[in-house]
Image (cartoon, rainbow, N blue to C red):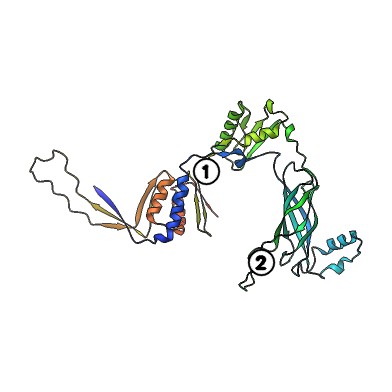
Amino acid sequence: MLSVNLNMKKIPFKKTLFFLLLFTFCFSLFTFAHAERIKDIASFSGARENELIGYGLVAGLKGTGDSDGTYYYQPVANMLARMGINVNPADVKGKTKNIAAVIVTAKLPTMLKPGAKVDIQVSSIGDCKSLQGGTLLATQLRGFDNNVYAVAQGALSIGGLPSRGGGGGFQNHLTAGAVPGGAIVEREVPVQLNRKTKLDILLSMPDFATSTRVASKINERLGGVFAKPEGPSVVSLIVPDNFTDKVVELISTVEMVEVNIDTPARVVINERTGTVVIGENVGINPVALAHGSLTIEIKATTPAAPAGAAPAGAAAPTAAAPAPSQKTSVAMVGGASIGELVTALNTLGVSPKDLIGILQAIKAAGSLKADLVIM
């Protein structure tokens, strides 16, 4: 019979203790079944956000605006002309660095009434150095149908200040900012949800098993066959008779239905930060790992004599001479669950950097039963 003794060399456990404890905690959570509300994993067609965009000017900059005025001199001249001030556009170009041309974006929720406010984001399109302290002038925000849905204006919030180290860097990105509640809605997105007779539920993570479970749970909640999976990302829902003209109430009811989602087997690695995220369905086939801090000693031992093999007092059979010890840096890791994989890696005392290399090697060997995503 062969006995296998694992003799670990001195490993800097302090360096990896926090990482290993975090992994153990995270994977212990995977042992419990969990359900998600439909509102957290899907959205309804017709009840989504709409993208708005517009071109604007930021004024009040302290010499950090666009240098040549290519993007703003004509709009500034036009704006002043509407105020009764006639200015030659050529006189504006290159005369001031207190103005910057920007692109303004916002997301308009469905059925938001005129007068409501939404947040906006502002980004420079010229060569300005900073938008700090600037004010966005009145800007029309249009949808892709070229209609104006909101008007934006207000003081920018940047959140970035020059670094104190004297190196010329910044603590944040100063050519983009935001104006919380900076746009007033002027036009409602024309969607009549209560008149719909059919809805499409769009899953954020396409999956055949999840879409099937969503349809089953909805039918169970509504007490009939109203939902049907149309594919991995869409579940169609016929509005029941008792929810006629009450589709908003139907959406509210369906959103609160809980579904056990099926997550793909996936390992995500961010090599820049050393972050490794392993899904609960990840498995591993039997594989041999080489690690420099592990020594395996395989020795031959004497098997126990079978009962009745020799009469009492008789000499026991002579055991064969022990085979020479064989030392190698190979550890056998086998199992079908992520728990066994993590236990084995914890035994090896791997660091985050080592873990990334080990997982990549296991995947290359074809033993990791999961998709490996490297960011």
Residue 131 position, x and y percent, is 73, 64
Q: Residue at x 61, y 31 (%)?
A: 228
| Alpha carbons under labels 1 and 2: distance apart | 42 Å
Viewer-nearest residue: 161 or 129: 161
Within-10-Å neighbours for mark 2: few <14, some 14–19, many 20+? some
Whichever of callouts 1 and 2 sits on the residue coming sooner in the sequence is 2
Image check: 288 left or right of 279?
Answer: left
Residue beneath label 2, please? Answer: 161
Image check: 257 left or right of 193?
Answer: left
Q: Residue at x 76, y 52 (%)?
A: 183
Asked if residue 284 can be seen in this view, the reply is no
Label 1 sits on a secondary structure element that is loop
Q: Residue at x 75, y 38 (%)?
A: 191
State whether residue 300 is above or below residue 155. above
Viewer-nearest residue: 188 or 321: 188
Residue beneath label 1, please? Answer: 264
Tell me the quadrant of the picture where the C terminus can be found. Answer: bottom right
Which tag is nearer the camera, tag 1 or tag 2? 2
Circles 1 and 2 in contact, beta carbons < 8 Å: no
Q: Quadrant of residue 200?
A: top right
Label 2 sits on a secondary structure element that is loop
Q: Amino acid at mark 2?
A: Leu
- Give the farthest residue toward the bottom: 166
Image check: 288 left or right of 323?
Answer: right
Name the mark on residue 24. none
Asked if residue 145 can be seen in this view, the reply is yes
